[in-house]
Image: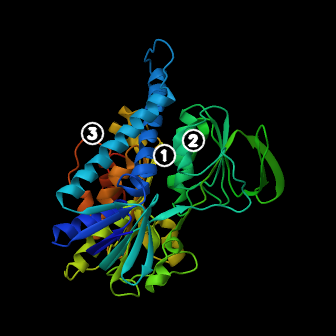
Amino acid sequence: MSEHQTQLVVVGSGPGGYTAAFRAADLGLKVTLIERYDSLGGVCLNVGCIPSKALLHMAEFFHDLESLKSHGLQVTGEVKWPVKDLKKWQQGVVDSLTTGLKGLAKQRKVTVLQGHAKWTGSHTIEVTHGQKTETVTYEKAIVAAGSQSIKLPFIPQDPRVLDSTSALDLKQTTGSMVVLGGGIIGCEMATVYQALGVKVTIIEMGNQLMPGTDDDLVKPMQSLLESRGITVHLNSQVKAVDAQSKAIKISYLDQGKSEKTLTCGQMLVAVGRKPNGHALGLDQAGVQVDERGFVQVDNQLVTNQPHIYAIGDIVGQPMLAHKSVAEGKVVAEVIAGKRVKFDAKCIPSVAYTDPEVAHVGLTETQAKAEGVDVNIGRFPWMANGRSLCLGRKEGMTKLISCKKTGRILGGGIVGRHAGDLIAEIGLAIEMCADVEDIALTIHPHPTLSETVAMSAEMIEGSITDLYVPKRKKD
């Protein structure tokens, strides 16, 4: 057993972990970064965000090609993308990024240890990699160990039952698939497999796909999924799963009433993720972990142990990479002695389906539930020139503002590149901008970004790209 000493140890090299490690190194700290995978990047880069988005780009390409055929594009022969070549390209994207992280760690003189980390004391961690074990002694630590897919006890272990990681292997791209869970991951992977030719059915317990997102943003996405052959069962609960020799048999309550069954060739379980708080031996360091596996922190990301910090999925919702990155920068600066804290006004959420669905800040549903008096401006993309040029008129942009002050409180977008466009609304919220600020900002034409300004004009009553009858005064 070898020993290693460091000022700061970071457990987990996902977006938050490597950001924290690199920022701390830039601020003069001696840093050690521990990662269980063979390459840096954590779940997000190796088996999550990046490889899944590469596949979603492929799905988008296939659908665009079909759309262009309807507009007269002549394609000679069948368009094919063999799975082995698709996976090779997907892995190339991942390798390019992981190689870049390895180089950045080397440039900053960050020591990287491969293996599974487990706390053995208040200032010690044991790292196991195969037959090799190393003890790390540290002054301060950052827990950035992320989360894992939730496993349901009634679902059998079977190679045909997939989670969000194994689904990326694309071992079976024919036949049928049932996706249990209509959240972001479920809808994204349904988009991928449908594009590859699989007959997909989504079973969601809630009354809409992507719970927590305003229904008017979800419906255009769901309509397009269904028009491409994806079947959606809402308000439906899976009661039993039987992995038979020739198929998987699923029993579920349809609309919470009649019990029905269906069979499929494979099943994706996408019912959420749980934090890895209980997998690290944090109790040996005196760190409090709640029953769900979350670690409680204050606004400087400090746990109940003043020398141990935590960021990312393990500290709570939303479990998003960009939230973890922001926390990673803050915690590194806190440890380096800077007077900063994590105080984000808003954190955007994006589903990279086709079309994409994104929202940030206060939702319309939340405003109603909390009794917040708001104005809402919606601009349909069917009145946007760039959207029509793309052959995509199903989109919509909406802004939510305080009725009294005009300040932007939230917004949502459904449509092509919604994930890129939502950043403008997030910036407006962070800068306490009001509707007039966006309406008077000159946006380039023709672009999809114009729809943000036009939704502001809908609230202002200055819209010219649509005719909106004046409201009668009370």
Q: What amino acid does circle 3 point to?
A: Pro
Give the residue at mark 1: 353
| Residue 35 location, quadrant | bottom left
Residue at 53%, 41% in the rendered image = 169
Q: At which x and y percent is residue 434?
A: 28, 68
| Residue 208 location, quadrant | bottom right
Residue at 17%, 67% in the rendered image = 26
Q: What amino acid does circle 1 point to?
A: Thr
Secondary structure state at the residue bearing disc 2:
helix
**Of labels 2 and 1, the one closer to you:** 1
Q: Is residue 258 above or below residue 68?
A: below
Secondary structure state at the residue bearing disc 1:
loop
Are discs 2 and 1 less than 8 Å apart at CB? yes
Label 3: how many Cα within 10 Å (few below 14, some 14–19, many 20+): few
Secondary structure state at the residue bearing disc 3:
loop
Q: CA distance from mark 3 to mark 1?
A: 24 Å
The residue sitting at the top extreme is: 76
**Of labels 3 and 2, the one closer to you:** 2
Are discs 3 and 1 less than 8 Å apart at CB? no
Q: Earlier in the sequence, mark 2 or mark 1?
A: 2
The tag on residue 446 is 3
Q: Is residue 178 above or below residue 217?
A: above
Residue closest to the eye, 160 or 268: 160
- Can see residue 213? yes
Residue closest to the eye, 149 or 204: 149
Q: At which x and y percent is residue 316?
A: 47, 73
The residue sitting at the front extreme is: 1
Q: Quadrant of the C terminus?
A: bottom left
Are discs 3 and 2 less than 8 Å apart at CB? no
**Of labels 3 and 1, the one closer to you:** 1
Q: CA distance from mark 3 to mark 2?
A: 27 Å
Residue closest to the eye, 347 or 299: 299
